[in-house]
Amino acid sequence: MPSAQLSLRLAAATLAGMIAVAAPSQAAPGQAHAPLFQRITLAKPGDLGVHTYRIPALAVAKDGTLLASYDARIDAAHDLPGNIDVMLRRSRDMGRSWSAPQRVVHYGDGIGAGDSSLLVDRDTGRIFLFYAYAPRGIGFATSQSGNATDSTTTLHPRYVWSDDNGASWQGPRDLTATIKSPTWKGMFATSGHGLQLFNDHGARGRLIQPYVFRGPDNLNHVVNIYSDDHGASWKAGVPIGDNLDESKAVELADGTVMENMRSSDPRMHTRMLARSHDGGIHFGPIAPEPQLPDPHNNGDIIRVAPLAAPDQAKAHWLLFSNTVDPRERRRLTLRLSCNDGQTWDAGRVLDAGDAMYSVMARLPDGSFGIFYEDGAGNLSFARFNLAWLHHGCRQG
């Protein structure tokens, strides 16, 4: 099996390699009373000779560096299989300016890599970039069952890692024999980001990355993989259910892990929810969330204040992003819940036109970033704060 030709150097942050946006004219960025909104395009069709850019992922390194990874679909727009690489850009100023694009996963010769997800271990600083490795001619729909590391007929779950805040990358490591059941067919990481648990309910520090797999029933299922030893070993949890697709896991103030999932059932046009009380391994019943309409798209959900004590009101605030039209991928909207997702506000529309995948991150100053696909085929990053959302959550 060919080895990944990994680009392990970040291009120098010269003036030519950086793009900047103007700073806001009002008060300091993190202040809730000063609305903040900035937007910048990070990739557009034709850049570097690439046909299509898709599949945003976003995370903040331990030192505060912002990382954005994405697919570079070199000669066509379609999913794997294909000539697809994983690109990365970094920002040291919370998204105002960005490094030149860095190609972190590249195979070539008809072999593809895509659907990246970033996961930061806040204890060690290690950053994991999960992706799907696609042997020539193999995509999710054509992937066969089996879990041999050297198989050329199945998608492979792999990752590379960085110990210097994303400046260089090592690997890859193949997890096929470790986390993939031999009865499962295609398997890929949900693009965007993973989760590290903060709560002390027996699983503090656990790393979680949601995956999608196609079972022997030919239905899509969701499962989390997890590590309790900072990524030295990984295990698969218990599959959450079928007729599901890309998901995000969020830890609530009481330690519950809530999985917010895209449905693959054509009759469903809402997000699907399930809850775990053992750190994201086993889940209870799946239920639709009618407050969150969804046109079968990849969205995101994060805690507004993940380090807040449970008795603080803001510990229960959640931020959600998706395209809210139940049948068309348009009207990308940011919504806030003040009570762990029991109710949601009407939100604020970020992009009223066509849009697709989105992923968010809490930035070091308390503002937020969202990296998303717009209707023109661009990958855009926007920075905003809660004041811009006009939120109505009670402080305390």
Image (cartoon, rainbow, N blue to C red):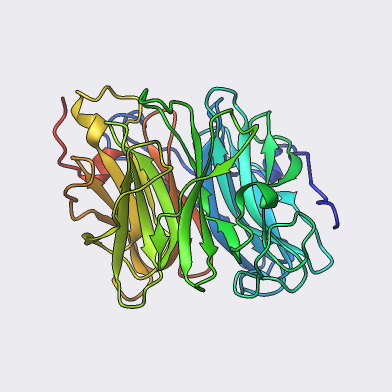
Q: Pick the quarter of the image with the N terminus.
A: bottom right
Q: Residue at x 67, y 75 (%)?
A: 76
Q: Residue at x 29, y 29 (%)?
A: 31
Q: Is residue 130 above or below residue 330?
A: above
Percent x, y of residue 119: 55, 39
Q: Is residue 164 above or below residue 335?
A: above
How many marks the image carries: the answer is 0
Percent x, y of residue 176: 68, 52
**As rendered, which of 299 and 260 lies closer to the eye?**
260
Percent x, y of residue 243: 40, 68
Left or right of residue 141, residue 6 in this image? right
**As rendered, which of 66 and 84 lies closer to the eye?**
84
Q: Residue at x 31, y 37 (%)?
A: 256
Q: Is residue 52 visible?
A: yes
Q: Is residue 73 above or below residue 29?
A: below
Left or right of residue 346, residue 136 in this image? right
Q: Is residue 33 visible?
A: no
